[in-house]
Amino acid sequence: MAFEGNRGVSPAPAAEQGRARVALCLQLGKRERTRLEALAEPRRLRSGEILCSVGEPAEYVFVILSGILKLHKNLADGRRQISRFLFSGDYLGPSEGELKYPWTAQTVSSAEAWCLERQRFAEFLRGSPELAQGLLRMAWEELESAREHMLLLAHKGAEEKIASFVLWLASRQREREDGEPLSLPMTRRDIAEYLGLKTETVSRTLRGLHRRGVITLPDPGHAILKRREELELLASGRRRARAA
Amino acid sequence: MAFEGNRGVSPAPAAEQGRARVALCLQLGKRERTRLEALAEPRRLRSGEILCSVGEPAEYVFVILSGILKLHKNLADGRRQISRFLFSGDYLGPSEGELKYPWTAQTVSSAEAWCLERQRFAEFLRGSPELAQGLLRMAWEELESAREHMLLLAHKGAEEKIASFVLWLASRQREREDGEPLSLPMTRRDIAEYLGLKTETVSRTLRGLHRRGVITLPDPGHAILKRREELELLASGRRRARAA
DNA sequence: CGTTGCATTGAATTTATTCAACCAGGGTGG
DNA sequence: CCACCCTGGTTGAATAAATTCAATGCAACG
């Protein structure tokens, strides 16, 4: 079961990937951070483990320290939507007044998180305008990404979606140059559920790009960007699918 | 041009529709509210008017007092996505650090809004934990709706989308009983851009429901729910399209 | 009274999905 | 140690769903 490493996720060192967006810790001064940390029960999660499930009583809120999680919702039948991936520095918690978690959070790779008792966190929050400001800023930014993602889900074609996704992943892996392999830590199914496609379509589209020399797929967990401009063209929909 | 009334939007009395979600004003005490109001430049908007446009320098934030606005983003070509509709009580502002508006806000019906100079609002916000709390709560709730909407956009079929949409509208018009007409204040195009469909598909699907007696469409701006249970079945995808 | 924007309808087409089969690798248990 | 059985990924052919293209009606507007 322990499915690990073959996706090139190094064993989740904290801050493995530079983040463009603001991380929670960065929103706090050292004092505040320490005070908050005192409330936290740290938790290590193995690959595929569930942090919290939709419908469960919402007793904790979370801060991701390392690794990648997926946040998903289900429809009555099997259909599932990953609404976002969580990275280190991200905050995760239900909105005030929600009694149950409205989503499931599950690791993609192994991960670490702080679990904070909700009541106590809320109390801390009341006493810390600094934290409130930080969370507000993060929430607004996330809202913007969510809107961007809606645009993708609603109006982009499969190839546009995949191209956008690959570029997004690339933009999150800073230290990496375009020649070296980009890690695709999630399965085809995860990608499909994030982009609103089927796994077969993801696979086909990815291989299509490979065949045309836009990217290379040394193994299912890695991609190499061969022609970034082409990928950007495809992502923006300014170019339709094209032979090599 | 002044396109009005034939969509059954009464001339936008404030608080025309009960809101399930928390409105900004409700988040503030009377004192705070008055202090905030002092910063506001009220603005009346006619139907179709633009409150702010994507790319414009973001000098104001807004609070909707009455009416309905649509918030949309564009893709390079004409494709457009309405990421949400704004109602009275909603707050609208770019995330901290954004220099330009990342969306366009345009009225669906006539509307009224407070325009608040961004600097001054930010200052006020720093001094009002009460407001920060309120905005945070609203942002988190909106995030949840956004995630719900992603699920719809990515995985629901046309009929499911339309059914969900009609029910959502119905749930927002409280005083109304199921026999009486439900107002559809937005055009087919707006609906299409909100649900990730084409106007033709919206029209066809709506008419399909009409033909099968699930709803009635006395005029393009109104619908009457004839068989709510059926509609709910369709919205949840537990039932595929079916003859009368 | 011609023009314009919205809504509607039909027919052809496109795109991604569905269904089905197959391969590779890792783990398990005989 | 090896056969077997997972899961994840890939590929092909048939299908279904919504889109595209095209045309029409209708109302308000100037």
Image (tube, coloured by chain):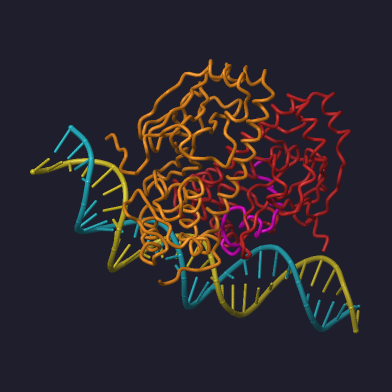
Chain colours: A red, B orange, C yellow, D cyan
Q: Check if residue A166 falls in the magenta segment.
A: no
- The percent coordinates of residue B83 (x first, y second) are 50, 42
Name the residue located 65 percent from the left edge and 54 percent from the top edge: A73
- Quarter where residue A228 is shown: top right
- The percent coordinates of residue A37 (x first, y second) are 86, 33
Q: Nearer the viewer, residue A121 or D6?
A: A121
Horizontal side of D29 relative to C27 (left or right) equals: left
Name the residue located 40 percent from the left edge and 55 percent from the top edge: B224
Name the residue located 59 percent from the left edge and 64 percent from the top edge: A200
Horizontal side of B160 relative to A193 (left or right) equals: left
Q: Check if residue A190 falls in the magenta segment.
A: yes
- The percent coordinates of residue B171 (x first, y second) are 51, 49
Task: Please state the total of marks drawn on the protein image.
Answer: 0
Say above or below: A138 vs A202. Answer: above
- Quarter where residue B237 is shown: bottom right
Name the residue located 35 percent from the left edge and 34 percent from the top edge: B47
User: Which quadrant of the rendered structure holds the C terminus of chain B?
Assistant: bottom left
User: Which quadrant of the rendered structure holds the N terminus of chain B?
Assistant: top left
- The percent coordinates of residue A117 (x first, y second) are 83, 40
Q: Which residues are magenta?
A: A177-201
